[in-house]
Image (cartoon, rainbow, N blue to C red):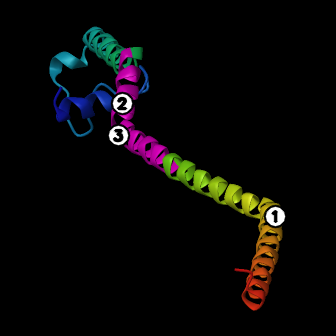
């Protein structure tokens, strides 16, 4: 369907009987049109034609066409919004994972206080043993038991 036809279909036609008179303003009536019978026939034909055009312009298939055109125009933008939202969701999921990992590391650091106290106790014990070994070595050197 080409552009000119689309515009013609998109226009609303007023309801039958609401149109102007059968003669255009400024036109000169012909002798045959002065007869009331001929004028009545012309009026009937134009009313039927107007009614047909009104029905054609406002039928459901035209409404569906307009809906289809709206969807066709707005769908690419909606698809882009969806892609953007999915990207933002992935980024936020990554940020949430990073924050959860950092919180877990901090909790483990606070829980590690028990282990540091144990290490401190073991180091004190190792220093005490080393001091005993040094004292025993000095005693052996001074008393030479060989």
Q: Which residues are magenta?
A: 61-88
Image quarter in which the N terminus is found: top left
Q: Main secondary structure of the magenta part?
A: helix
- Nearest to the observer: residue 132 or residue 99: 132
Disc sitting over residue 118 in the figure: 1
Q: Is residue 13 visible?
A: no
| Residue 89 position within the rendered picture, expressed as x and y whole percent measured from the top left | 53, 46
Mark nearer the viewer, 2 or 3: 3
Indicate whether residue 74 is drawn in magenta.
Answer: yes
Q: Is residue 146 visible?
A: yes
Q: Residues within 10 Å of mark 2 (few under 14, many from 20)?
A: few
* Mark 3 residue element: helix
The outermost residue toward the bottom is 142
Q: Which residue is mark 2?
A: 20
Mark nearer the viewer, 3 or 1: 1
| Residue 10 position within the rendered picture, expressed as x and y whole percent measured from the top left | 32, 31
**Above or below 8: residue 26:** below
Q: Which residue is mark 3?
A: 76
What residue is shown at x 73% (from left), y 86% (from top)?
A: 144
What residue is shown at x 79% (from left), y 86% (from top)?
A: 139
Between the residue at mark 2 and the residue at mark 3, the CA separation in whole angstroms equals: 43 Å
The outermost residue toward the front is 146
């Amino acid at each position: 369907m080409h552009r000119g036809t689309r515009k013609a279909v998109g226009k609303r036609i007023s309801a039958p009987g609401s149109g102007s008179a059968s003669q255009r303003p400024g036109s000169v009536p012909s002798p045959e049109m002065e007869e009331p019978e001929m004028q009545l026939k012309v009026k009937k034909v134009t009313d039927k034609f107007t009614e047909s055009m009104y029905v054609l312009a406002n039928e459901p298939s035209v409404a569906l066409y307009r809906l289809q055109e709206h969807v066709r125009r707005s769908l690419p933008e909606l698809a882009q919004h969806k892609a953007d939202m999915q990207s933002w969701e992935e980024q936020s999921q990554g940020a949430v994972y990073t924050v959860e990992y950092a919180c877990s590391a901090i909790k483990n650091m606070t829980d590690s206080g028990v282990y540091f106290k144990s290490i401190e106790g073991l180091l004190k014990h190792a220093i005490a043993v080393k001091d005993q070994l040094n004292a025993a070595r000095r005693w052996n050197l001074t008393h030479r038991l060989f």
